[in-house]
Image (spheres, rainbow, N blue to C red):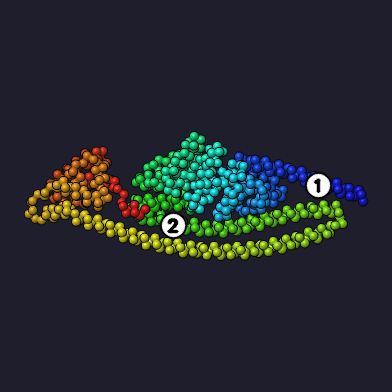
Amino acid sequence: MIQTKLITIIILALIINACSQKEGTIANQLQIADSYIKTQPQKSLQILDSINSRGLGKDPYFALLYAQAKYRCYIPAENDSLIKVALAHYSTCDNADMKAKTFLVAAQIYEELSMHDVSLGYIHKASEYISNVSDAWVSYYIYYLWGRLLQDGYDVKSSIEPFELSLLCANKLNDTSSIITSLKELSYSYLANNDTITGIQKLDRALDLAIKANSCQDLASLYGLKAQTYYMLGSYNEALRFIDKALVYNHLLNGSDTISNLNFKGRLLILTNRLDSAEYYIERGRDTTTLVKANLYYSCMGMLREAQGDYKGALEYNKRHSANLLKIAAGIERDKVARLDKQYNTTRIERENSELKIKQQQSWLYILAIIIILGIAAFVAYTVYSRRRKQLLDTLRHQSEDINRLQQNAALLMDEKIKASEREMALAAQANDKDKELNTSRALIADLKKRILLNNRVVKKVQETIDAAKRPKTNRQPEPFSDAEISELVAVVNDCYNGFANALTAQYPSLTGSEICLCCLIKIGLDNPSLCAVLGISDSALRKRKYRLKSTKFDPVKQFETLDDALQSVPLRKRQEDATDK
């Protein structure tokens, strides 16, 4: 009897010793994995993957490190099972560093799961302990993620303060990459808050640091943001200059240009009236592999066709753009349902795997218990069986509740989808009404310009002269135009033809008053017989005068066949109604 007790004690001691050594080894590995999280997250993930099969899913430290390593390695979180284990333990502990870190990782995970409000709630909790955090990196990530979440929630004004604090932390860490990232986000927030001067200052400072660090990725992003800034300010030529720099660094970084930057450059070229170059870059940036990329192309091509006067083509591209938007909205709804279904399935599989592991461990414990004490094997088996039966019944009940809840959520999502479709139809009807009003306004403006032209004193005089020349037995020579009449003619042509005379004198400053008068008469639609009647000269003299004017002033390199063709090339100012539409 004494020997049996002694053998039992020795076996238990050996088991306890083996377990303690195993726990010590795992603890050391977790410490090593924690040390690699910031600098070498891939290595940290390899260590954690190697010990994942040892049944540590319920260990809070392992769960926190594993969730953090996956996030740092850009592996999307499928559910919140890991972070829930860490939160259950560390949210009530006295360690401020671990509390803040756990809430930070929870905010990151729930951001990936598209649960914006939950993520913002955890980042607020993390900020409550930030004054007692000893790790400056944790403070930086808390402030940076806080600003990002506010930006994503369209509260850009409130995001400025967290980003300023993240910049202070980055300066303390003396980490150039973090400083550039904070400055870039600050620039975006200031610009979105209409503080253009401060936004550009932050952006220029980030560019200086990126140039010194020779970071192609940061330079490509920053030059693209600067191009967008000048685009919002209406400085399209400056925006073109910076988007070209962004494309250069994109090419150095990826070996090819980005789709969005090529389409953006095409849009800028349209706004600067370089339509041929615009079509070239838009076609280079054409990518219809996804709905979002295709929308960039359709939007730019619609804008280009409208600028070219091809309104039918513009309408066709705009229809494709609208159809893609509807498909994207429908896809988002389907993704939400699929993500919820995937989360449920993943959680169920993990729970079943965990139950299988527990069952295996319990089986070994049963065998060990039978070897040590055969007498109590039946009692232990009965106890385990009762516990397992209860667990399975509880599991089945929870699964039934989860299925009912998911069905309710699916019904709610379907209702939201129907409401969204109704709103889209209402918006489409409003857009059609606005288009009709716009077309009516344009027709009224065109009619008004025509009336202004016909009621002008000088134009009436021209018409009277032409009518008089058509009457038989009329040999009276027309009176030459006075300076005042030429000025009045120039003014009415400017009003009715989008600043034609001003553009003409700006492009060809050597033109005399009579030459400008002749150009204006041609612009209002007088043919050669009418011009001969108004100017009192013969047809051959008129042709010589027009040829001499084209050759000496307009077209010394003989690019155009006639003076009328040369006048058509004069760039007009942008129409006011187009600016109003935009």
Mark 2 nearby-residue class (10 Å; few <14, some 14–19, many ≥20): some
Q: Position of residue 338 (x, y in %)?
A: 57, 58
Position of 371 relative to 183 (above/below): below
Which amino acid type is shown beneath numbered disc 1? Answer: Ile
State the separation of the CA atoms marked 1 and 2.
69 Å
Q: Which mark is residue 15?
A: 1
Query: Which numbered disc flags the more N-terminal residue, 1 or 2?
Result: 1
User: Residue visible at 85% across and 57% down?
Assistant: 376
Q: Name which quarter of the figure residue 34 lies in.
A: top right
User: Residue visible at 85% across and 52% down?
Assistant: 371
Position of 206 relative to 440 (above/below): above
Q: Position of residue 209 (x, y in %)?
A: 49, 37
Looking at this view, name the residue that lies furthest to the right.
1
Q: Is residue 523 left or right of residue 574?
A: left
Q: Is residue 226 left or right of residue 483?
A: right
Which label sits in the foreground, 1 or 2?
1
Mark 1 nearby-residue class (10 Å; few <14, some 14–19, many ≥20): few
**Would residue 285 be visible to someone looking at this image?**
no
**Would residue 150 be visible to someone looking at this image?**
yes
Q: Which mark is residue 508?
A: none
Whether label 1 touches label 2, CB < 8 Å: no
Q: Is residue 437 left or right of residue 135?
A: left
Q: Position of residue 121 (x, y in %)?
A: 57, 53
Please name the residue that numbered disc 2 is placed on: 322
